[in-house]
Amino acid sequence: MSTELLSIRHLTTDDGVTVDSVFAGLSEQSRYLRFHAPMPRLSGSVRRSLLALDGHDRTALVAEVPGPSGPLPVGIARLGRTGRTQGEIAIAVIDEWHGLGIGRRLLTDLAELAGRSGYTLLHAYVLPENRQVLRLLESVFPGATRHWDGWVLQVDCPVNPEMNPRRQPRDSAATSPRPTVSASTRTH
């Protein structure tokens, strides 16, 4: 499996098949770690919620690799606004593609998108046994901190201020961040 041709695009409200495909690629354990509860199937209400995207307050990115019959979705990262400059993030990568940098790429692109959208702090709610995601969040978001929120860990992830378009660059020669989403004919 190669991530050499990995592309990232916005998930759209019409991407139900994509959501279903990523969910189907998650083991029972991965589903539990992502949704914090046993989830043998994706209920209609959860599916609708995952597709309730407006491209501003609720947005998501999907990672895809070329497949035999078109793009194959291998992961999704979500961002939901919880305050003027704060949001909640979540991520899922299908088991077969774990450990190949897809989660890192999704979270990095999501952080850049959040920065350009004026977010300063993102929160992730992670089960304490999900050490892989805890390490990933802390590596993608330098300065991330953890604290208990009931029976889960809340990871507070500061967004790099250089990604925030409202902030004036210190150096007038500063360049804008690289585009995070590959070209697509789909709209968000």
Image (cartoon, rainbow, N blue to C red):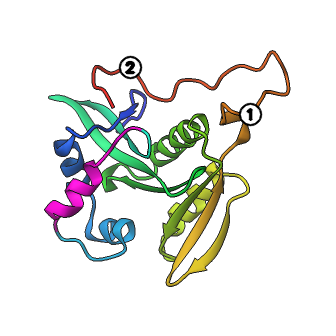
Residue type of the residue flagged with mark 2: Ala
Q: Position of residue 12 (x, y in %)?
A: 28, 37
Q: Secondary structure at mark 2?
A: loop
Mark 1, residue position: 167
- Residue farthest toward the top in the current orientation of the protein: 173
Left or right: 28 with respect to 119?
Answer: left
Labels 1 and 2: the sequence-earlier one: 1
Q: Position of residue 130 (x, y in %)?
A: 48, 70
Q: Can you see residue 25?
A: no
Looking at the figure, which quarter contains the C terminus?
top left
Residue at position x 49%, y 84% in the image: 151
Q: Position of residue 70 (x, y in %)?
A: 19, 27
Q: Position of residue 11 (x, y in %)?
A: 32, 38
Q: Which residues are magenta?
A: 41-55
- Residue farthest toward the front in the current orientation of the protein: 84
Left or right: 20 with respect to 132?
Answer: left
Q: 83 and 34: which one is in front?
A: 83
Q: Which mark is residue 98?
A: none
Q: 22 and 162: which one is in front?
A: 162
Q: Secondary structure at mark 1?
A: loop
Question: Disc 1 versus disc 2: distance between alpha carbons?
Answer: 27 Å
Mark 2, residue position: 183
Residue type of the residue flagged with mark 1: Arg
